[in-house]
Amino acid sequence: MYNILICDDEEDIVKALKIYLEAEGYGTVCTYNGNEALKALRENDLQLVLMDIMMPECDGITAMVKLRETSNIPVILLTAKGEDTDKILGLNVGADDYITKPFNPVEVIARVRSQLRRYMQLGGSDKSEENLVIGGIELNDAAKRVKVDGEEINLTPTEFEILKLLMQNEGKVLSPKEIYRRVWNDTAYAAEGTVAVHIRHLREKIEINPNEPRYLKVVWAHGYKIEKGV
Amino acid sequence: MLEKLWLKMTAIFLSYVTVAVFVLSTFATAVMGYYKFYFSSKDTVKAEVLEDLAADEALYAADLFESDVNLTKYYRDKNVRYEAEDIETGEIIESNYNNEEYIAFSEMTDYEWIAREQTDDFGNVYQVSEPVPKATVKIYIPQKMEKSDIFSVTASLVEFGYPLKYGMIFIAVISLALSIVLLCYLFCAAGHVKGGEIKCNAFDKLPFDILFATVAVCIMLGLIGVYEMRFNDPLTIILLFIVGSVGYFLGLGTMLSFATRIKTGTLLKNTLIYKILKFLFGCIKKLWKFAKNVISGIPFVIKWILLFAAFLVFCLFSAFFVFFIFEYMSEFLGGLLICGAVAALIAAVVYVLVILGRIKAGSEKISSGDLEYKINTDYMFGDFKSFAESLNNISNGLQSNINERMKSERFKTVLITNVSHDIKTPLTSIINYVDLIKREKTDNETISNYVDVLYRQSSRLKKLVEDLVEASKASTGNLPVNLTECDITVLLSQTIAEFEENLQKSELIPVLNVCDGGVKVLADGRHLWRVFDNLMNNVCKYALPGTRVYIDVKKENGKATVTFRNISKYQLNISADELMERFVRGDSSRNTEGSGLGLSIARSLAELQGGRLDLAVDGDLFKAAVIFDAIK
């Protein structure tokens, strides 16, 4: 059983999160500002932190910085602002993921589970040579298998080839035409649609929230890329 | 010391004395120098001086002798001995000279005019008279002078003056030095009154040019008057003395007044010429002002007609000169005049065109939105200048207006962002607890229906809040925009893929019509995606199920156009412009999901990237066109 620290100044939100997480079988510790969270972290055996950014006394960012001095526990930030700058700031100080308010409980649970899997299985995955690893994605070319956060995912052969191509070119933007040419081994003619649909399906399979992908990112009007990170 | 009146008066008097002494001693020195006092002995000087007098006397005596005046009687009371000798015979005609010792001697020949006849080359006879020497008049000044006359006075003057010849130079120098010191003091003290102030007295208040001219004329008249008199008259000397004194005081007073005026700075201002010039200048200024008022009062068109009329008159005038006056003098000059008139006209036209060009360029800049632009009003005048300045003022007014509006818009954006944050927090709780209620098993169907409504509406509220923030940011341009080369066909295929499921759900069939070759535009991919996203969302929400959705990509006249066409599910009884307004939706009842901000956001975002979003409604056909400048 994993213990999760919930930190938000809104008691109702904390309670709701507590209900969801306990329903999934996680233990919870509830705190209402950054200082309490840091104190709770020292006193309890915790595996994950869910923390709001805007809090009185000690806000989420400050607490993050202090927390990271001693611990590498996964942290998911809750943010109401949804501003790009807030997200980037949060990730830069060491958060592992973020969820914008108002959030979908199902998404919260999925992200919590994903982070916990990665955290607990860290170093446990087999890092053989034929394995391509980016973040939580592991691609075994020989076995034609793909694992996301340790969970096996079923991909069609085309989806697998596209994922492999993108993972081999980590961080590089590939245009639909190029993807088509290299995966289908054919000259692309009006192939953008085909590639786009396949990538859409692939994204739905490997991402928790396909509209806010962590790995497979759409570079609008240019193509696609896979990036390490959240 | 500069203020004491008695000191000044004393100084004036003393300076008068020293100047007089200086003048007299200098005069005496000059006279003594002339008679060689400094190079010869006393007797020689005396003899020479008396010889000069004797020469004068001889001339006079010859005259007297000629007029048969009895010389013995004439010279009875004078220290003069004379002798008249016939030239032809050498005998003495008249004499009172007894071979006494004499100091000075002079002689003069007396001529008699004898007439005789003469014949010129043409045989005309005429009379000429020529002088024939008759007698010699000799004048002796005796050593012993018993009588008092000019000779005895002169002799005693030489006797008296000779030992003083160096003393005179000394006196001249000393008096000069004293005069300079006194005058310097007087100039310094001029104008100083009690209390350390410098003030003009009544004398200083007279116009200086008048004063100066009067004094100068007085002195000149006095000098001329004295000059006209004979010098050896004692009356003359007195008159000279009086004229000199009066002239000195007048001159000194004028110079002191000059000094005072310089000190008070009234020298130039307190002159008649200055006053006259000032008056004239004032008159000209008033006239100019009047003319300006008259000109500005004339309506614009009439003013210019008058100007051209004046030019025409000038041309006619010059033509008149050329054909009637310069005809005989110089055709070249007349031609020059006409050329000058034409050149002036051309210059004026060019000037007007240049100014108009400047104003035109400026007004175009301003009307195209560059409110920072200021028309350069250098070298402009009159109507052009006021025209250009009005344009500049319009842009100023607009600029401040826009700044004000930008500020309030930005404030609104901040407000909306903050408010939406505050709304999101309770909304999170609502959504979560509604979800929790939904999870509770209940047999009461009414409650589960109600919860469904709550769930749906809270989700809508969430969407509304998100769209509100985005709309306010997009419309105020409060978003970072990174323009890059974007391939519209790629973006479109990505968009269609994203909406694959939605389209299927809405039973819509997309028909893509893409022109050959990629269509590239300069845009921010993420924002352009949001434009397409909003438009496609609209399509999915409002298109009639079972119809086709046409999406065309065209490249025409350097413009890339993406057109979305669909058949509306609802009757569109509002105009395209109204559809673009915030919170306006295709169905006026507002029962469907959606915030009513989609089209407004799409248009703001398109404009933010330099593009355009056009809407058209034709019956049930809804058409949205995204237009960007295409790049090769």
Image: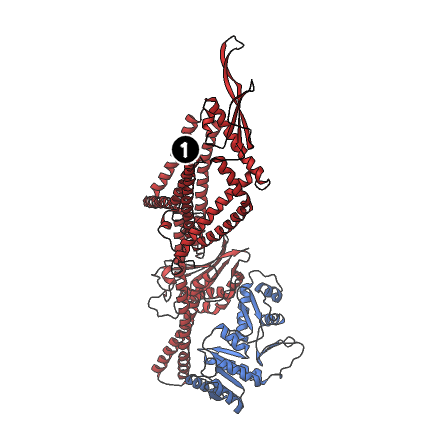
Chain colours: A blue, B red
* Nearest to the observer: residue A32 or residue B616: A32
Provide residue B302's location: percent of width, then percent of height.
33, 41
Describe the element under mark 1 as helix, strand or loop: helix
Q: Which residue lies furthest to the right in this view?
A: A129
- Viewer-closest of B438 and B170: B170
Q: Is residue B293 above or below residue B233?
A: below
Considering the image in quadrants, where does the N terminus of chain B appear? bottom left
Which quadrant: the C terminus of chain B? bottom right
- Furthest-bottom residue in this view: A43
**In this rendering, would B153 be left or right of B450?**
right
Instruction: From this view, report whether residue B526 is shown above or below residue B234.
Output: below
Marked residue chain, label 1: B
Kindly tell me whether residue B262 is visible in this rendering: no
- Residue A146 percent across, percent down from the top left: 60, 77
Residue B585, placed above or below residue B257: below
| Residue B55 makes an appearance in the image | yes
Residue indicated by mark 1: B315
The mark tally for this picture is 1
- Amino acid at the residue labelled 1: Cys
Does B341 appear above or below A84? above
Expressed as whole percent of the image width and height from the top left, the position of residue A17 reads 45, 84
Residue at 42% x, 61% y is B566
Please name the residue shown 39% across and 34% down the image: B312
Q: How crowded is mark 1: few (under 14 residues within 10 Å), some or many (20 or more)?
A: some
